[in-house]
Amino acid sequence: MWHDGRMPAWEKLNQQIVACDRCPRLREHCRSVAETKRRAYQDWDYRGRPVPNFGDPQARLLIVGLAPAAHGANRTGRMFTGDRSGDWLYRALYRAGFASQAESTSAADGLTLADCVITAACHCALPANKPTREELEHCQVWFDQTTDLLPVRLFLALGQIAWRSVIGLARQRGWYEGPIPKFAHGALVELTDGRHLLASYHPSQQNTFTGRLTEPMLDNIFTTARSFLP
């Protein structure tokens, strides 16, 4: 199926991400969480490592989150899997036709994505959800390589840090010039060669519990995304 050699390169990149040890603080945090666990997940063997990209290696939609949740993706080993943020995201992806099922519970649950990849500004769980500038810079190399391997037409940034990461990459590659555009839910930036950047509030509990982000709002984002991927 992968006569162009993209799948081996994709697998190699994900293996390199999982083996990354550039940020000692984050690696220690991932290990510590995996050892202490949450009471509800005492029977789980936490992955406790950087979390690789997840999705279709021929995807035109690249979703960029902040980082794996300590007891979500840091436990399951799959982006946005095992926490409430992921519950919201995968339901929306399923309704929009990007996901094969509405639930993502483990890396072995059979879920697949079509024309979509999920990555993150940081591939390790973050203490207090706050990366340092150096940690973001260390993970930028994985974002660069992920973008190189995909025929990306649309970046979807979930939250302001992801938004800034995409703008940084776009500037570096000459896809965008000028100041950083203001982040807002539904904000859209035209990049070069038909590429676009779309923004959404992150489906964190802080946003979904307060009503700042609703399921219809998230569905509208993916309706917009679909319009850029004929």
Image (tube, grey):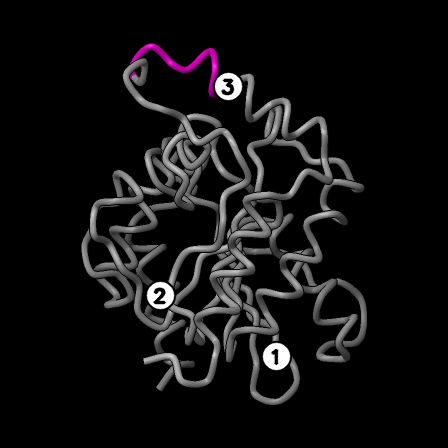
Quadrant location, the C terminus: bottom left
C-alpha gap between disc 2 and disc 1: 17 Å
Q: Position of residue 129 (x, y in %)?
A: 59, 31
- 3D distance between C-alphas at marks 1 and 3: 40 Å
Please state which of residues 16 and 195 is positioned toward the viewer in this rendering.
16
Residue annotated with mark 2: 222
Identify the disc placed on residue 33. 3
Pinpoint residue 23: horizontal percent, then vertical percent: 72, 35
In percent of width and height, residue 75 lies at 40, 30
In the picture, measured across the screen, residue 165 lies left or right of residue 200, that is right
Task: Please report the bounds of the magenta region as a residue range.
Answer: 33-40
Amino acid at pointer 2: Phe
Disc 3 residue crowd, few under 14, some 14–19, many 20+, Cα 10 Å = some
Identify the residue shown where x is 39% and y is 44%.
78
Q: Nearest to the eye among marks 1 and 3: give it.
A: 3
Give the prevailing secondary structure in the magenta stretch. Answer: helix
Q: Name the mark on residue 190.
A: 1
Q: Quadrant of the N terminus?
A: bottom left
**Closer to the N terminus: mark 1 or mark 3?**
3
